Image (cartoon, grey):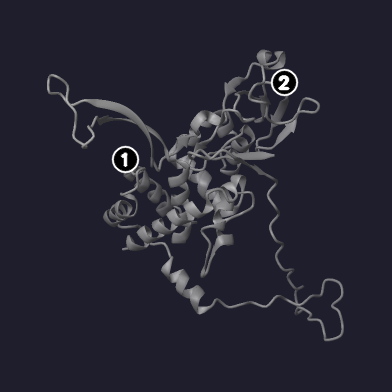
Amino acid sequence: MAHFRTAHPGHTRSLVQQSAPGHRPAPARPQHGRAPVTAVAGRKAKGRHRAAPAVVPPSAADIAALATYARPTAFDRIKLREGFLTQFGNSQRFDSTAIPPLEQLVGFMEADSSIADIRWMAYMLATAYWETTSLKKETVPTLDKKGQPLRDKKGQPLVHSRQRWAITMAPVEEVGHGAGRNYFLPVKVKALPGGEARVTEQDGDQFTVSAKGLQTAISKGARMGAAATQKAVKTYADDDGTELSYFGRGYVQLTWWSNYARASAQLGLGLQLLLDPAQVLQPAIAYQLMAHGMRTGEGFANGRKFSNYFNGAKTDYVKARAMVNGSDHAADIAAIARQFEIILLAAKP
């Protein structure tokens, strides 16, 4: 099993992800020279001769939606910034330092020809907004009861440090690094000559990871993950691999060494992210992980993808949360996605 962990404050659950459901099979094509056979009234179609599914033409609403949400080549950066300030500037979590990362993230989407719908962009931006909001330490003036700055005996303003949750719009590490969870403890990873890797967990369970990111148990009865209180056994202590941790990182908080391995292979990076998990904090790689999963349903998205929720006139920002973390805070993130939709539509040239 693979687990997904969110880093947003107040989130305390992880989503157990099962194997992604298979794609719905495409209708069988008729043999060359034959037209599809339709069942006659009172007679059942036999064998493989079945009626071809009716092709439903797009409705006027579908066509209008496609035109409305068609992504332009580039967005007006001034309008993008103004929209961000208008929509989120009054939030206690607003931070102006999030604007450059926001523009960088939009830039990745502009350069990605596979992202053609503004609603897709809005949902990715909302996900990044929610998942990367983090504690920020800052120094602020000390105020009296009337809201006026206090000063010391020399007339210098008094200041104090505080922490607050702030929007970053940049890849971040999971708060607490997964403390208490079965992916919290580091594991040892050893690259093997054939392009595979060996993973040893602190309880002694060992796995071989193929170049395609698939794991096979080496030790009998091995189960992925170890209790956060597990003490390292001799097998772990003697292993000559590199000790690495696989807590949440990125825009969508990738967790578990198995997910790092699988996602790395899906992006065409071999086992690069398994061998160097900190690379997930690089914005370009973090973007690829988020966009690929949401577009294809692979990896963390657990078989769910954009086209399930945004298709023609269909727009479902609430259920789209299933791509990332079930229904956790789905309504909150949907509201943020609608705000980003307003921003992006206004920033179209």
Q: Where is residue 299 in the image (x, y as percent from the top left)?
A: 61, 45
Q: Where is residue 190 in the image (x, y as percent from the top left)?
A: 63, 23
- Sequence-earlier tag: 1 or 2: 1
Q: In this view, does 47 lie to the left or right of 184?
A: right
Give 34 or 198, whichever is nearer the viewer.
198
Residue 154 placement: quadrant? top left
Residue 300 visible from this viewpoint: yes
Amino acid under disc 1: Thr
Q: Is residue 282 left or right of residue 55?
A: left
Q: Which residue is drawn at 30% across and 54% down?
A: 86
**Which residue is farthest bottom?**
41
Give 235 or 138, whichever is nearer the viewer.
138
Residue wearing tag 1? 97
Residue 307 placement: quadrant? bottom right
Q: How crowded is mark 1: few (under 14 residues within 10 Å), some or many (20 or more)?
A: few
Residue wearing tag 2? 204
> Is 70 located above or below residue 334 in the figure?
below
**Which residue is farthest front?**
145
Q: Which of marks 1 and 2 is in front?
A: 1
Residue 122 visible from this viewpoint: no
Amino acid under disc 2: Gly
> Is 239 located above or below residue 60 in the figure?
above
> Is 317 located above or below residue 18 in the figure?
below
Q: Position of residue 127 (x, y in %)?
A: 48, 48
Question: Which part of the image, by quadrant, shows the N terminus?
Answer: top right
The label shown at residue 54 is none
- Per the image, label 2 sits on a secondary structure element best described as loop
- Per the image, label 1 sits on a secondary structure element best described as helix
